[in-house]
Image (cartoon, rainbow, N blue to C red):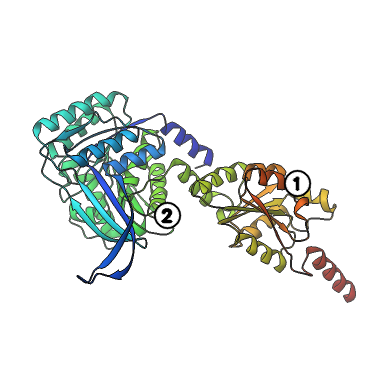
Amino acid sequence: MERDALRQIFSTIAEKKVLVVGDLMLDMYIWGKTSRISPEAPVPVVEVERDELRLGGAGNVVNNLLSLGCRVAVASVVGADDDGRKLLDLVGRAGVATTGVLLSAQRVTSRKSRVLASHQQMLRIDRECKHEISAEEQTALLRFVRQELPDTAVVLLSDYLKGVLTPELLQGVINLCRQAGIPVIADPKGADFTRYQGATLLTPNRREAEVASGVVIKDEVSLLTAGQRLRNQFLLDALVLTRSEEGMSLFLADGSVEHLPTEAREVFDVSGAGDTVLAVIGACLAAGCPLTTAARLANLAAGLVVAKLGTSTVSAKEICAEFARRNCQPHGKILSRTELAFLLGVEREKGRRIVFTNGCFDLLHAGHVKYLQQARKLGDLLVLGLNSDASIRRLKGEKRPLLDEAERAQILAALDCIDYVTIFSEDTPQDLLASVRPDILVKGGDYLAEEVVGKALVESYGGRVALIPFVDGKSTSNIIDTVLSRYRDDQ
């Protein structure tokens, strides 16, 4: 898939509406630090620094869809209590109508409270009820679903077994969607998948698939047996089986199976990863993507979200940035100016300081490497603007460069201290700097600060110029002179 095609997918997603039906919950995060054990019991004492309420359960699916740019409707039942009102407020502030969320005096709004210290979850406290909603509430939700379907592209069923998605409601929604020709995708729970029979697609994890199929997944043969059994037994068009660090497996309508390797870089918290998978697959199918494309993007998004702490979301911009990082030229670092500007926008949103330097870097040597390593230490990532072959010829004469721009870029991209490389053809990096807008512009110590191209631009928005001395005696010209001298002596 090309990057332009990916951007078109997210452009189309923004035109689509997705309906989420399921268990809305509150997630409370209590953040603090711990440095001692309680004298009252052998437990750590957490000194609370802040707390935060987030939408959880089906609400996290809603948030993920909003991050992808979708229009969203939601149907659920919550308690007519203080937490229920807080939940409705969060839904409304997210820009989603609450007309499909019923308040019930017979229910307690589900709340999961997590205590975290030093980036680790210390304790979770659950407050909830799990009894099924009433027949009247089921009828009201089904009525809401029916009125929303005409302009809905996909329906997502987010089941946390808290009583909203009863077997009768599930089958009612699935039948309505089948009649309307609208895909209905469920993130299933429990041992009995009969509840989801006839859905377009299910997204169980390994443990859920084992329980529902009765097959212990220990190798590829048992994996195939479990997946095919579930797809056939419950009349599914397809099945996406997520397998944690092993990626995911797609069981398709034609009987074929495709395995996608994990995309995770670093895992901090797996909570909510299933919500992200459900949301991304649903949004992509709403945009008309093939399931294989939808699953690949969901797999990539899940790899991003588990690197975050707590139930989190992944934006369309983050997915595009990660796709570009993984699928660009060698090492995923060599980018066009447009791609670089897009990725740096994501980095900037994360609060990262961008360092920029530029040069020819013809015949890379130890002096270059030390200079670049020192430049990287000044910020969170280093962008290198590399002179094109044509610009070097104008600057240094027709005999240079000795290595062409593609080879120089690949060598530089192999250095750990460099995050991105982009080639520019102008004689100076002034236009490139206007696109990159670095926080720190770095040049060699042989320059005076006033001589640095782009100094005024960078300082105009609060950036600064830093000068780093070059290593004495290390230069491309010296290497060329040494080679010529030695080979002349041999003649």
- Which secondary structure, mark 1? loop
Query: x%, y% of residue 472?
Result: 77, 69
Report which residue position mark 2 lands on: 263
Query: x%, y% of residue 23?
Result: 21, 41
Looking at the rendering, which quadrant does residue 173 occupy?
A: top left
Near mark 2 (Cα within 10 A), the count class, few <14, some 14-19 or many ≥20, is many
Looking at the rendering, which quadrant does residue 12 occupy?
A: top left
Q: Horizontal placement of 447 versus 254: left or right?
A: right
Query: x%, y% of residue 319?
Result: 45, 45
User: How many labels sit on residues?
Assistant: 2
Q: Horizontal placement of 238 versus 382: left or right?
A: left
Tell which residue pokes out farthest to the bottom in this image: 490
Answer yes or no: is residue 13 visible.
Answer: yes
Q: Horizontal placement of 341 versus 258: left or right?
A: right
- Which secondary structure, mark 2? loop
Q: Amino acid at mark 2?
A: Glu
Q: Please tell me which residue lies in front, 86 or 352.
A: 86
Q: Please tell me which residue lies in front, 265 or 182.
A: 265
Q: Decide: is 105 above or below 189.
A: above
The residue that appears at 71% across and 48% down in the rendered structure is: 455
Near mark 1 (Cα within 10 A), the count class, few <14, some 14-19 or many ≥20, is some
The circle drawn on residue 428 is 1
Q: Are marks 1 and 2 in contact (CB under 8 Å)?
A: no
The residue that appears at 16% across and 51% down in the rendered structure is: 191
Looking at the rendering, which quadrant does residue 156 occupy?
A: top left
Between disc 1 and disc 2, whose residue precedes?
Answer: 2
- Label 1 – label 2 distance at C-alpha: 38 Å
